[in-house]
């Protein structure tokens, strides 16, 4: 079983845009956090299914080091 980090960005008009950094172009949306997470799971599964069908390597987040940098304005 694999796990992927997702980034959820609240949108001004409501809802959340979800980005999966390890899977370029894997982006989805949900009207609330539950829907955003469910849509992200489905998008990841479909993305990986497509990679498998095309014989491409499946990226993972295993070796990713995550840091948050705060910059002064």
Image (cartoon, helix red, strand yellow):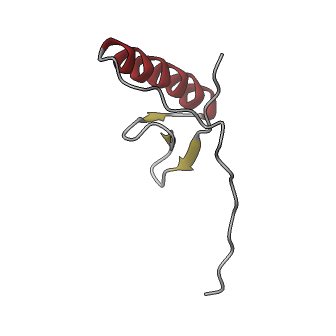
Q: Report whether 46 appears left or right of 39.
A: left
Q: Nearer the viewer, residue 59 or 67?
A: 59
> Which residue ends up furthest to the bottom in the rendered image?
73
* Quadrant containing the N terminus in the rendered view: top right
Q: Residue at x 44, y 24 (%)?
A: 43
Q: Residue furthest left?
A: 54
- Name the residue: 32% across, 12% down: 53
Q: Residue 25 placed where, x, y %?
A: 36, 40
Residue 3 x/y as whole percent: 65, 27
Is 70 left or right of 27, judged from the image as shown? right
Residue 63, placed above or below residue 3: below
Query: At 62% from the left edge and 34% from the top edge, which residue is drawn?
Result: 33
The answer to which quarter of the image holds residue 52 is: top left
Horizontal side of residue 58 vs 62, given as left or right:
left
Q: Nearer the viewer, residue 70 or 9?
A: 70
Quadrant of the image containing the C terminus: bottom right
Asked which quadrant contains residue 71, the reply is bottom right
Q: Quadrant of residue 54?
A: top left
Q: Is residue 36 above or below residue 68?
A: above
Count of marks overlaid on the render:
0
């Amino acid at each position: 079983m694999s796990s992927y980090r997702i980034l959820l960005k609240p949108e001004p008009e409501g809802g959340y845009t979800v980005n999966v950094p390890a899977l370029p172009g894997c982006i989805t949306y949900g009207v609330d956090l539950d829907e955003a997470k469910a849509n992200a799971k489905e998008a990841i599964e479909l993305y990986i299914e497509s990679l498998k069908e095309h014989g491409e390597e499946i990226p993972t987040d295993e070796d990713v080091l995550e840091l948050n940098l705060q910059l002064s304005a």
